Image: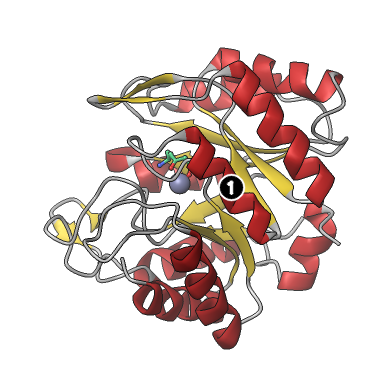
Amino acid sequence: MSVIITVAPTGPIASKSDNPTLPTQPQEIAEQVAKAYELGASVAHIHLRDENDQPTADLDVARRTMDLIRERCPILIQLSTGVGLTVPFKDREALVELRPAMATLNPCSMSFGAGEFLNPPKDVRRLATRMQELGIKPELEIYDTGHLDACLRLRDEGLLGEQLQFSIVLGVRGGMAATPANLTMMVDRLPSGAIWQVIAIGKANLELTAIGLALGGNCRAGLEDTLYLRKGELADGNSCLVERAATLARNLDRSVASIEQARVTLQIV
Ligand code: KMH
Ligand code: ZN
């Protein structure tokens, strides 16, 4: 199956002082997303920043960013409902009212680096219900083994639809370590028919992205997951990371999915 490449241009934590090419403002994000689309990305995972570059769930910023992306390319927009560790869940969940094609659903609370990522069960259930009402495809972010079981319980309650799309997140401090053994263990545990991608945070980004592709998964590329192209060399924006992911896929004899192919695979109408 062809590879869906998701570009994740801006995460919740890094700043321009970590990598000056990190896009933070709507125009910057839209420009880098459009370049990623040209290089093969079919999904854009979007975090928003305010005018001081802090994570925000401000609906005007979100609307402006989505409009600027749509003016430039037809990429599928996946809004992050993770947003940032200090943003209240109520604000985070309101983003789905803008009806992106996709949005993340983080099933469990956890330690996250030096902070806490709060996803209380009743809030997660309410968000899953609302996403289903609005026809928004959830990207299920699983950082540990129990997070998969939490998602399967939501599915059993009828809150996720039948076809599940997982991000196996490796390398967050507080979640699973970024090791090949953890990746293969999680892939083996996924329900049959599930679609999945690797999100490999930090140093092991390249190796685990490559292993995920070789195992038949999709992939994610961008400065949210790694600020470096290789050890000691900062990535010059998102393009080089997306280009590298597309090259990896093609070298493994896997074609890169178009928007239409991604829509069909992800069952996005
Ligand atoms: N940076 C991710 C591992 C989300 O986007 O919903 C965590 C995150 C969640 O940002
Ligand atoms: Zn994210």
Between 263 and 23, the one lying in front of the other is 23
- Identify the residue shown where x is 61% and y is 17%: 121
Front residue of 138/258: it is 138
- In which quadrant is the N terminus drawn? bottom right
| Percent coordinates x, y for residue 109 in the rendering | 47, 20
Look at 64% across and 19% down and name the residue there. 122
Residue 107 drawn at (x, y percent): 59, 25
Q: Please state which amino acid type lies under the numbered disc 1.
A: Ala
Query: Looking at the picture, does residue 22 appear above or below residue 184?
Result: below
Helix, strand or loop status at disc 1: helix
The residue at label 1 has a CB less than 8 Å from ligand 1: no
Question: Quadrant location of residue 47?
Answer: bottom left
Which of the image's four quarters has the C terminus?
Answer: bottom right
User: Is residue 94 left or right of 247 when viewed as pictured?
Assistant: right
**Residue corresponding to mark 1:** 94
Whether residue 266 sits left or right of residue 92 in the image: it is: right
Q: Position of residue 77 (x, y in %)?
A: 61, 64
